[in-house]
Image (tube, grey):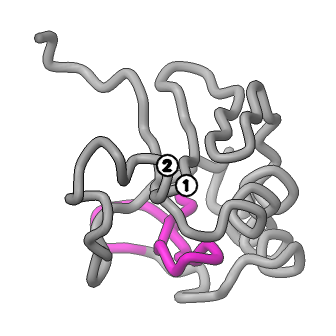
Amino acid sequence: MEARINLITIWTDSMEAMKGFYANSLGFEIANDLGNYVEFKNEGVRFALCMRESMYEYSVEYKKQSVGQSFELAFPCKGPDDVDRSYKDLIAKGGNPVQGPQNMPWGQRAALFSDPDGNIHEIFADME
């Protein structure tokens, strides 16, 4: 095994809402849509959504519902002002506001939003 990530898959029970959010609100282009599995075009690591139920026959572990915040995706912005603009645009397009833009002690401007399943994600930029 190589110690590198090749694919990130978000398991969901709400494919249409999640697919719409990642395509329409975040702007990911769909590369492959099999109905229960959707992969988006993304530079570097592959990115997909998959219906949790499609994996039930392989392992009962997929029937377990996650509790709490298990992961975060972080999306870079061009600069601190772009964080503010992008956050406003993202919320207008259906993102759920979690925390508006603010300067963080580690030298970034960041804002938090959630997708339709409640996963909290971040947009950020280094402060110049």
Residue depicted at 24% across the width and 20% down the height: 4
Q: Nearer the viewer, mark 1 or mark 2?
A: 2
Q: Element type at marker 1?
A: strand
Which span is picked out in magenta?
104-125
The percent position of residue 93, horizontal first and vertical second, equals 87, 73
Q: Which corner quadrant of the image does residue 86 belong to?
A: bottom right
Nearest to the observer: residue 43 or residue 107:
43
Q: Which mark is drawn over residue 89?
A: none
Nearest to the observer: residue 85 or residue 75:
75
Q: Which mark is drawn over residue 51?
A: 1
| Cα gap from disc 1 to disc 2, whole angstroms | 6 Å
Image quadrant holding the N terminus, namely top left
In the rendered view, does 45 fall on the left or right side of 86? left
The percent position of residue 79, horizontal first and vertical second, equals 65, 51
Amino acid carrying mark 1 in the image = Met
Q: Element type at marker 2?
A: helix
Amino acid carrying mark 2 in the image = Ser
Residue depicted at 45% across the width and 43% down the height: 9
Residue depicted at 49% across the width and 49% down the height: 54
Labelled pair 1, 2 in contact (Cβ < 8 Å) = yes
The percent position of residue 71, horizontal first and vertical second, equals 33, 62
The percent position of residue 100, horizontal first and vertical second, equals 60, 86
Above or below, 55 against 17 in this view is above
Q: Residue furthest front?
A: 57
Magenta segment: does it hold 94? Answer: no
Nearest to the observer: residue 98 or residue 63:
63
Q: Which residue is mark 2?
A: 54
In the rendered view, does 107 fall on the left or right side of 31? left
Q: Which corner quadrant of the image does residue 82 belong to?
A: bottom right
Nearest to the observer: residue 38 or residue 103:
38
Residue depicted at 73% across the width and 77% down the height: 95
